[in-house]
C-alpha cells in the first residue's frame, strides 16, 4: 500500500482519536500516508475540563487542544495533521474553506476518506462537517473546477461512529479489526487529557466492536472500529480477502 494516501476530516481536535485512531494506525503501518484535518479545536463545547482551570483563556484552550492532538497524531503515525481553526459551537464552514478542502482532495487524491455521521442531534458541528466533506469531494471531481488540474476520482467515504449511534441513524456496515494496533490507539486516547472521562468509554466501544467483528468472521478479534460506507463497494470478487 506504499504511495497511497488517506484523508481524515475531524470536526474537532479529538474526534479522529476516539473514532478513527485504529484505522489511522493500521493503514499507517501498511505504508499509507494519512492526513488529518482538524477543522476546529473543540475549544468551546469539548474542553470543559480545561475551562474549569483558573484563569483559562480561549487561546490557551486552543493551544492545549492542539498539543494533545499533535501528541495523539504522533502516536498513530499520522503523516500530516492540520488545524484549520474554523470555530466551535458553531463551526464556520465558509465558501473559502470549502474550496480549500476541494484543493486538498486534489492535492492528495486519497484512497479513502473518513469523517462524521450524517446526523447527530447532540452536536451540530458533526453533520455539518459530514456534508462539507461530501460537498468538497464533488467539487474536486468537477472538470470545471480549476481546469487543467487532474480531477479527483471516486475515493470511498466511510462515516465513523458517533457518540450515540442509535440517535444518529448511523448504521455500521463495515467492521475493522484494530487489535494489532490497539496499544497505539490507547496511547493516542490517553493524549487527550482534556477529555479523560471518555478514555474508558471508547475502550469499551472498541471491545464491543471487536466482539461483533469476531462474530462476523472466523478470526479472533479483540478490538474493532465500525464504519458506515456512503457509497457501494466496487469489487472484483465476492470471496473475502485477508489483510490488505
Image (cartoon, rainbow, N blue to C red):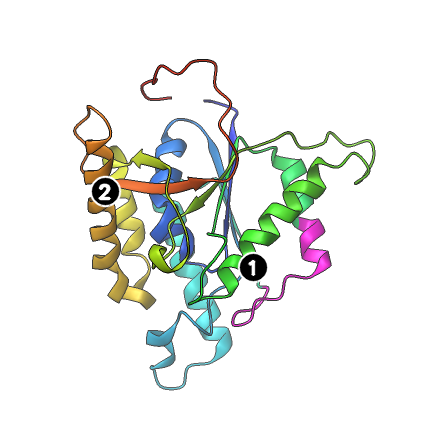
Looking at the rendering, in which quadrant would you find the C terminus? Answer: top left
Residue 91: say if magenta.
yes
How far is the residue under mark 1 from the one under mark 2?
31 Å
Labels 1 and 2 touching (C-beta < 8 A): no
Label 1 neighbour load within 10 Å: few <14, some 14-19, many 20+: many
Residue at image x 26%, y 65%?
196
Q: Which residues are magenta?
A: 86-100
How many numbered discs, if any?
Answer: 2
Q: Is residue 16 above or below residue 45?
A: above
109 in the magenta segment: no
Inspect this view and state whether residue 39 appears: no
Secondary structure mostly seen in magenta is loop
What residue sits right under mark 2 in the picture? 183
Left or right relative to 203: residue 58: right
Which of the 4 quarters of the picture holds residue 69?
Answer: bottom left
Q: Of the residues under marks 1 and 2, which one precedes in the sequence?
A: 1
Q: Position of residue 112 (x, y in %)?
A: 51, 34
Residue 128 shows which numbered tag? 1
Q: Residue at x 52, y 58 (%)?
A: 127
Residue 76: x %, y % from top left: 36, 42
Any part of residue 118 in sight = yes
Check the image and report above or below for 158 versus 71: above
Q: Is residue 27 above or below residue 168?
A: above
Circle 2 residues within 10 Å: few <14, some 14–19, many ≥20: some
Name above or below for residue 107 compared with residue 240: below
Outermost residue to the bottom: 54
Q: Secondary structure at mark 1?
A: helix
- Compared across the picture, whether 225 is left or right of 96 comes to left
> Which numbered circle lies on residue 117?
none
Q: Position of residue 190 (x, y in %)?
A: 27, 56
Disc 2 element:
helix
Amino acid at each position: 500500500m506504499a504511495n497511497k494516501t488517506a484523508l481524515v476530516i475531524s470536526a474537532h481536535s479529538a474526534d479522529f482519536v476516539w473514532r478513527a485512531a485504529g484505522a489511522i494506525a493500521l493503514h499507517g503501518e501498511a505504508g499509507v500516508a494519512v492526513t488529518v484535518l482538524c477543522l476546529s479545536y473543540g475549544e468551546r463545547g469539548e474542553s470543559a475540563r480545561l475551562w474549569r482551570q483558573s484563569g483559562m483563556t480561549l487561546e490557551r484552550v486552543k493551544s492545549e487542544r492542539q498539543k494533545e492532538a499533535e501528541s495523539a497524531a504522533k502516536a498513530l503515525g499520522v503523516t500530516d495533521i492540520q488545524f484549520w481553526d474554523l470555530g466551535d459551537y458553531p463551526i464556520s464552514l465558509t465558501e473559502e474553506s470549502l474550496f480549500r478542502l476541494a484543493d486538498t482532495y486534489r492535492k492528495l487524491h486519497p484512497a479513502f476518506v473518513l469523517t462524521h455521521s450524517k446526523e447527530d442531534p447532540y452536536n451540530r458541528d458533526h453533520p455539518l462537517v459530514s456534508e462539507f466533506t461530501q460537498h468538497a469531494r464533488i467539487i474536486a471531481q468537477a472538470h470545471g473546477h480549476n481546469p487543467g488540474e487532474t480531477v479527483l476520482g471516486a475515493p470511498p467515504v466511510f462515516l465513523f461512529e458517533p457518540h450515540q449511534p442509535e440517535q444518529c441513524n448511523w448504521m455500521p456496515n463495515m467492521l475493522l479489526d484494530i487489535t494489532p494496533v490497539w496499544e497505539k490507539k490507547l496511547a493516542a486516547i490517553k493524549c487527550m487529557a482534556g477529555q479523560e472521562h471518555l478514555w474508558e468509554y471508547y475502550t469499551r466501544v472498541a471491545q464491543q466492536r471487536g466482539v461483533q467483528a469476531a462474530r462476523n468472521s472466523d478470526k479472533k478479534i479483540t478490538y474493532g472500529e465500525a464504519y458506515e460506507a456512503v457509497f457501494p463497494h466496487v469489487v472484483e470478487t465476492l470471496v473475502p480477502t485477508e489483510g490488505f
